[in-house]
Structure formats: structure tokens, C-alpha cells
Image (spheres, rainbow, N blue to C red):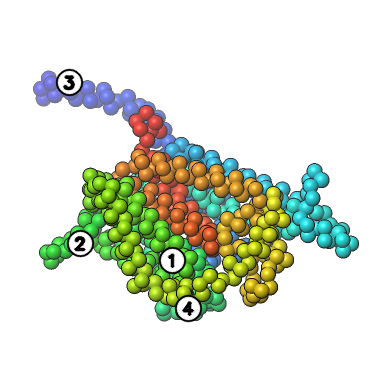
């Protein structure tokens, strides 16, 4: 061995030797030691179990199921905190969501307690006093129900916080997003199979409502439409680009980022299944909101290409003029209208037959009157079913039981009063700022951010006419996706801002 080789070997040995004498904690990153790994994996298992329970119990609409799922999610949240600590990249959203959750919980407790400081309770308590019935007036007319409603609100809130802590690194988030998309697509395949082969079955039990419509894993077709709309967008956000198979045996999909032919075919199958599931629900609001979200997704991907290449998916060349991109958006709109005319015939026919003759629009004046009487404190979550009958117009028909408003915004304002507006504005601001950062600064992963924006549009539009977001199972499912997209948006900061 030459003197030069010996000196190089000594230099390398001198460089490596100090690290060998360091403790294990200094060599192994803090989030990779045995204790932390065990805590994180246990938290992940509890997280998955909680989500599984919500999917098997029609969206955790039953108190026992919601309570069990909330306990598991709370345990996962606690373990995730001890294992990972608070997130930094998404710290703004995390703190805002935590503050909003705490505010809602304390406000619900306030609504359920006897009216303090001489505040008058709900007007229903006055009617009891006039009848000679003594009772302690509270802000809510049904204080016992309000505390139960806290569980349905806490489950999605804890889910978002848990996702922000468990999924941080881009590689881990990408794997989780793929699992999320595949899970939604597999549920769509199962739902379509059950819809065709066993139309009177719903998951593991008998189907009693919405016969003739696909609803699995939920009871209501509108919730199912929003669910599969989100799953469809999650799958489309993994789009890798297309090429024509001119030569027999050539690859149909670009094998970019490790895509094999089998994975590409799986993507096609699950995407088609999710799209078919949305249409099979026959939900007018759900299908319309999904098509609006798809238009937003294609338009955003056109104006904000993931990478400067056609292989990025929906994006065109970065040198395209604004006029050319507008023409692409118009072309996408025409294609969506054509697809709707070909495949959404049942939904369009149902919309033409019913038009605006729908009880949800007829009862709107009654809901607005209830909101007026309940302000500024609200009546409490879960109290709608007991309060609304006094405001229900008999001319709208007496069929059915209304346990919530077909409008998330009106239902939230009625339940929580002014604090609902505070929570809504704060969460919208935190989410919008993070997504704006993601679409401007994330290059190759920008399509995930575009997908997150599209799901926000989908949920926001559908929430105007339906109550999908009020079902704990769906709210949990959507916030899983939104939380992971938020982690993508908050990642990859400038060199001076990076955490590691």
C-alpha cells in the first residue's frame, strides 16, 4: 500500500472514529430509536383501527361506534405527541385546529350548563315556567344531548391533529396518500359489487334506505357521493401521464417514479370504480359538486404545472401562453359536460323531475327563524332534532325525520351560534395559507396540493345542500387527506427555514 493510500485510510478512519464513540442516541435520529418507533407504530395502529371502525359502522353515526373510535383516536393522538412532538412545518394549521377544537368543546360545555350570569336560556325554558314546571334553564334546550354531540365533533378534530403529527416527511406522506387513494378505490369496487349483486345489503347488514342507490359504506347517498368524490380526486392526484400505444406491447403509461404496468392498471381500475361509484349514488348535489371540483383540479393543474414536462399529468408545457391555457380549461369543461351527458343520465333525469321542488328548500325559512331565535349562543350540537319541529312548516310535508339541516353552514350556525363563524373563518384562513404556499413552492408534488384544493371545493359546494360533513366518518376521512396534503404543502422550505 502506498503512502498516499495509507494517509487516505488514516484520514477516513479519523473521520469515522469519533462517531463510533458517540452514544446510540446521537448516531440514530431521535425519531428512529426503539422507544419512539414503538410509540409511533402503536399510534399508527390505533389510528387505523379508529378509521376502520368509522367505515364499518356507516360513518360512526351510532354513539357507541363514535365513542370507541374517538377513544382510539385520542390514544393515537397522545402517543403521537410523545413520539413525534408538535409539527413545525404545519404548526400554524395545527395550533389553529387545536384552538378551534378547544373553543368548541368549552362552548358546548357552556351551552349545557345552567345559564350563568343571569343570562336567559332558550325560549323553551320560558314555556316550561309558564306551565308551572320548575327547571334550571340552560343555554341549550337539550343540555344532555349537547355533551354527546361533542364526541362527533372531537373525532374529526383529533384525526386532523393526529395526521399532522404522524405524517411529516414527504416520502412517508406520499406512501400514506397512495394507501389512502387505494383504500378509497377498493371501497368503491366493493360498493359497486354489493350494489349490483346484493342491492338489499349495506356493508355487513340489511339495507333499509335509499334502495336503488349506491350508499356503502354510509346510509345516505349524498355522503357516499362526497366520499367517493374525494377518493376519485385522491387517485387523480397520482396521475403520471399518458401516451398512445402505437407499437403493440409498448407501455401504455409512463413508468415515472416507479410505476409499473400492474400499478398503472390498478390505478385505472380504481379510478374508474370511484367515478362509477359517484354516479351510482344518484346524488344531484354530490355529482354536481364532484364535477365542479374536477374542473377546478384540471384548471389549477393547467395553470400550476407540477413539473416542466407533459409527463407531470394534467399540466401542459410551462411556456404555454395564458390564452392557450384558457383554451385547455375550456376544452376540459366541454369534456366534463360530455362525460356528464353520457354517464350521469340518471342524476340529470332526477334533477329534471324534481327541479327545485325539494323539501330542503321549503324548510329553509324555518331553519333561518330557528337560527335567529338561537343567536348568539346557539342551541347546541345534536339539538336540531328537538328544536326544529317547532319551526317546521306543515305545507312542506310531514314525511321523514329531520335530525340535521341539509346545509352545514346553517346547521353549524344554529348549533354553535357566533363561535361557529369564528371557527369557520380561522380554519379557512389557516388551510388557505398553507395550500397557497404549497401550490407556489412545491414543484414535483404540486398535483397533491391541487388535489387538496379540489376536495375543499367539493366539500364546500356540497355542504351548501347536504350534510356529508356532519357525518363523523366522512369528516374524518376527508380530514385525513387534507392533513396529509397540508404536510406536503408545508414541507420543503428554503435552506434557511428547513427543520433538518
> In terms of sequence position, does the residue under pointer 1 or pointer 4 come before the other?
4
Marks 4/3: CA distance? 80 Å
Number of other residues with Cα within 10 Å of mark 2, as a class: few under 14, some 14 to 19, many 20 or more: some
What residue appears at the point 35 percent right and 50 percent down from the top-left corner?
Answer: 300
| Label 2 secondary element | loop
Residue wearing tag 2: 252
Choose mark 2 or mark 4, whichever is in front: 4
Residue wearing tag 1: 287
State the image coordinates of residue 446 (x, y, percent, origin top left). Answer: 34, 46
Query: Residue 425's image quarter?
Result: top right
Q: Residue furthest right?
A: 132
Marks 2/3: CA distance? 54 Å
What residue appears at the point 60 percent right and 57 percent down from the top-left corner?
Answer: 410
- Residue 7's disc is 3
Q: Nearer the viewer, residue 344 or 93?
A: 344
State the image coordinates of residue 121 (x, y, percent, origin top left). Answer: 78, 52
93 lies left or right of 234: right
| Label 4 secondary element | loop
> In terms of sequence position, does the residue under pointer 2 or pointer 4 come before the other?
4
Residue wearing tag 4: 212
Number of other residues with Cα within 10 Å of mark 4, as a class: few under 14, some 14 to 19, many 20 or more: few
Amino acid at each position: 500500500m502506498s503512502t498516499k493510500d495509507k494517509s487516505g485510510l488514516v484520514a477516513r478512519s479519523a473521520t469515522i472514529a469519533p462517531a463510533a464513540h458517540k452514544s446510540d442516541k446521537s448516531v440514530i435520529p431521535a425519531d428512529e430509536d426503539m422507544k419512539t418507533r414503538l410509540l409511533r407504530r402503536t399510534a399508527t395502529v390505533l389510528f387505523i383501527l379508529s378509521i376502520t371502525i368509522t367505515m364499518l359502522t356507516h360513518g360512526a353515526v351510532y354513539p357507541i361506534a363514535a365513542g370507541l373510535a374517538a377513544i382510539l383516536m385520542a390514544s393515537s393522538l397522545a402517543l403521537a405527541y410523545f413520539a413525534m412532538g408538535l409539527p413545525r412545518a404545519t404548526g400554524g394549521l395545527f395550533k389553529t385546529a387545536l384552538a378551534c377544537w378547544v373553543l368548541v368543546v368549552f362552548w358546548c360545555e357552556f351551552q349545557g350548563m345552567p345559564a350563568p350570569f343571569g343570562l336567559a336560556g332558550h325560549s323553551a325554558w320560558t314555556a316550561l315556567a309558564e306551565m308551572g314546571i320548575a327547571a334550571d334553564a340552560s343555554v341549550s334546550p337539550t343540555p344532555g344531548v349537547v355533551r354527546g354531540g361533542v364526541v362527533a365533533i372531537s373525532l374529526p378534530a383529533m384525526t386532523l391533529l393526529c395526521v399532522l403529527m404522524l405524517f411529516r416527511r414527504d416520502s412517508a406522506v406520499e406512501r400514506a396518500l397512495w394507501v389512502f387513494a387505494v383504500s378509497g378505490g377498493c371501497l368503491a369496487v366493493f360498493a359497486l359489487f354489493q350494489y349490483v349483486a346484493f342491492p338489499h345489503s349495506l356493508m355487513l347488514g340489511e339495507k333499509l334506505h335509499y334502495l336503488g342507490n349506491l350508499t356503502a359504506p354510509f346510509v345516505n347517498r349524498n355522503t357516499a357521493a362526497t366520499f367517493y368524490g374525494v377518493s376519485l380526486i385522491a387517485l387523480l392526484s397520482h396521475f403520471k401521464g399518458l401516451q398512445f400505444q402505437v407499437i403493440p406491447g409498448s407501455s401504455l403509461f409512463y413508468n415515472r417514479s416507479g410505476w409499473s404496468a400492474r400499478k398503472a392498471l390498478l390505478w385505472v381500475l380504481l379510478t374508474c370504480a370511484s367515478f362509477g361509484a359517484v354516479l351510482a349514488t344518484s346524488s344531484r348535489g354530490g355529482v354536481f359538486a364532484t364535477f365542479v371540483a374536477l374542473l377546478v383540479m384540471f384548471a389549477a393543474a393547467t395553470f400550476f404545472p407540477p413539473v416542466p414536462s407533459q409527463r407531470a399529468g394534467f399540466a401542459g408545457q410551462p411556456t404555454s401562453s395564458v390564452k392557450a391555457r384558457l383554451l385547455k380549461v375550456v376544452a376540459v369543461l366541454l369534456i366534463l359536460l360530455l362525460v356528464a351527458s353520457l354517464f350521469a343520465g340518471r342524476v340529470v333525469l332526477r334533477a329534471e323531475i324534481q327541479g327545485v321542488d325539494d323539501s330542503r328548500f321549503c324548510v329553509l325559512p324555518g331553519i333561518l327563524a330557528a337560527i335567529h331565535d338561537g343567536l348568539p349562543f346557539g342551541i347546541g350540537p345534536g339539538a336540531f332534532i328537538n328544536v326544529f319541529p317547532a319551526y317546521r312548516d306543515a305545507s312542506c310535508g310531514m314525511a321523514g325525520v329531520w335530525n340535521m339541516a341539509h346545509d352545514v353552514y346553517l346547521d353549524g350556525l344554529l348549533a354553535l351560534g357566533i363561535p361557529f363563524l369564528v371557527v369557520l373563518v380561522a380554519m379557512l384562513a389557516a388551510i388557505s395559507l398553507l395550500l397557497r404556499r404549497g401550490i407556489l413552492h412545491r414543484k414535483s408534488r404540486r398535483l397533491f396540493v391541487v388535489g387538496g384544493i379540489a376536495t375543499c371545493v367539493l366539500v364546500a359546494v356540497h355542504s351548501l345542500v347536504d350534510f356529508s360533513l356532519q357525518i363523523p366518518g366522512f369528516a374524518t376521512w376527508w380530514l385525513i387527506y387534507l392533513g396529509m396534503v397540508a404536510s406536503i404543502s408545508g414541507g420543503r422550505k428554503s435552506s434557511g427555514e428547513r427543520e433538518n
